[in-house]
Amino acid sequence: MHPYESLREKLVQPFLLLGFIVSATLSLITFGLLAEIEERAIRRALHTELESFRYRHAVNPQASPANGALIRGYFLPDERLRGIRPLPPGDESIEIRSIDVSEFSVLVSDVEGKPFTLLYDRSYISSNLQQIALMLLIATIAMTAVSFLFGHYLSRKVLQPILRLLGEVTSKASAPELAEQHASFATGDYPQDEIGHLARELDRYAHRLYSVLQRESYFASDVSHELRTPVAIIMGAAEVLAELPGQPAMAQQRIEVIQRHAARMGQILEAMLLLGREERPESDLACSLAEVIEEATADCLPSLSGRDVTLKTDFRAFPILPAERSLVYVLVSNLVRNACAHTRQGSICVCLREDCFEVIDTGIGIPDERFPELVKRHVKGEHSSGHGLGLSIVSRVCARLDWQFSISTNEGQGTIARMRWPKPSDSSSLLATPP
């Protein structure tokens, strides 16, 4: 799962980065230009002093070199300037040197053929450059902070309608019931831009979804209601026929089949209606899983007639779960019927434990790579003659009940379908007394 990434941060970060880059670049350019201007001023001052001394020395050979606070001149060689070497007449160089504890710009040239040097004290210039660098650093930080504040303000203005739309969608999604008024968005509260256009399209799409869900809900309710009546009539008629005296054994068996499958149809109708609803079953429901397994295995026994397959149950616990009985019946019966359909000979065992139940068969098995596809609708095994809906319904029921469904198999050696439910948080899930 990807970590949450704030859209506001994504908007603020470019402003912050852009402000820092622009202000830092301008500060560096400004500092470089000022430093270059100072260097040129130093060179100009040294050359001006050199020409002035040459003129004074030509007029008066006894003239003394400059000896001020910034510029001082010396004829070379000089004991105080052992690190400065004379240059041949006509050559000239300017470099920065550290003498004693100070830094100087050193001009080496000649005066009437005599090696000569001028020293320019850079202490004042260095101090000025340091102050300028500090000021530019403060300006960079200030501009970066201004960019951050502006980006934060702009992102808040931009995201305000998006956050309003998000809050509206969240309130609709968390509504206890889906009603027509909950499907409408307050499109008039949004600006006439892309966000307003998005809100209007969401409003149109929400109304369309509500209409589709309403039709599906009405269809499921109407079908369930209309089919319950004939199922109840069939069950009533079968009960009357079962009580008639003198029935042949074959007719009695057929009546029992009609009763069993009518009851099964009623449970399936109720389960399908529950799967089509959004609300969850009541938490105070109680379902004896052992009774459901007994009923489901009894319904599947006729499908094994004529085959060398034994269907048995192994109950090591008798849990009572807070689940809708019809949903549990559909889940168990689908798994057992799948095992019966894929087992040509051998055995099928339904094992019930305190925290899970398993359907173990000795059928043909399923390749491991087919598992992710088998829970999809209309996807079935190679040897299946069904419609590919059984495991899809099992998957939906598990999602409804918050149960875990897993399959392990070896092709040609059978399959183990395991259903595990969460551990109860209190004593509401009881263990029934063995029948």
Image (spheres, helix red, strand yellow):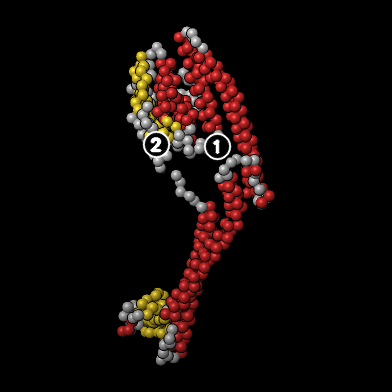
Q: Residue at x 48, y 39 (%)?
A: 283
Residue farthest to the front?
A: 245
131 or 52: nearer the eye? 131
SS for dot 1? loop
Label 2 CA crowd tier, 10 Å (few <14, some 14–19, many 20+): some
Whether residue 30 is visible to the viewer of this picture, yes or no, is no
Mark 2 or 1 closer to N-term? 1
Who is closer to the viewer here, 402 or 230? 230
Q: Is residue 243 left or right of residue 412?
A: right
- Counting other residues with Cα less than 10 Å from the Cα at mark 1, is it few (<14), some (14-19), or many (20 or more)? few
Query: Looking at this view, is 432 or 190 the one in front?
Result: 432
Residue at 44% over, 80% down: 124
Q: Is residue 9 left or right of residue 109?
A: right
Q: Which of label 2 and label 1 is nearer to you?
A: 2
Q: Position of residue 11 (x, y in %)?
A: 54, 55
Q: Is residue 194 above or below residue 98?
A: above
Q: With respect to residue 117, does 285 lie above or below?
A: above
Q: Is residue 5 visible?
A: yes
Q: Which residue is disc 1 drawn over?
A: 278
Quadrant where the C terminus sits is: top left
In the image: residue 117, left or right of residue 255: left
At label 1, the amino acid type is Glu
Q: Which residue is mark 2?
A: 430
Q: Secondary structure at mark 2?
A: strand
Nearest the eye: 432 or 282: 432
Which quadrant does the N terminus fall into? top left
* Residue 89, x across and y down, in percent: 39, 78
Give how far apart the Cα atoms at labels 2 and 1 are: 27 Å
How far from the left and from the top, in percent, is residue 194?
Answer: 63, 48
Q: Is residue 204 left or right of residue 273?
A: right
Q: Could you tell me the amino acid type at mark 2?
A: Leu
The numbered dot on residue 233 is none
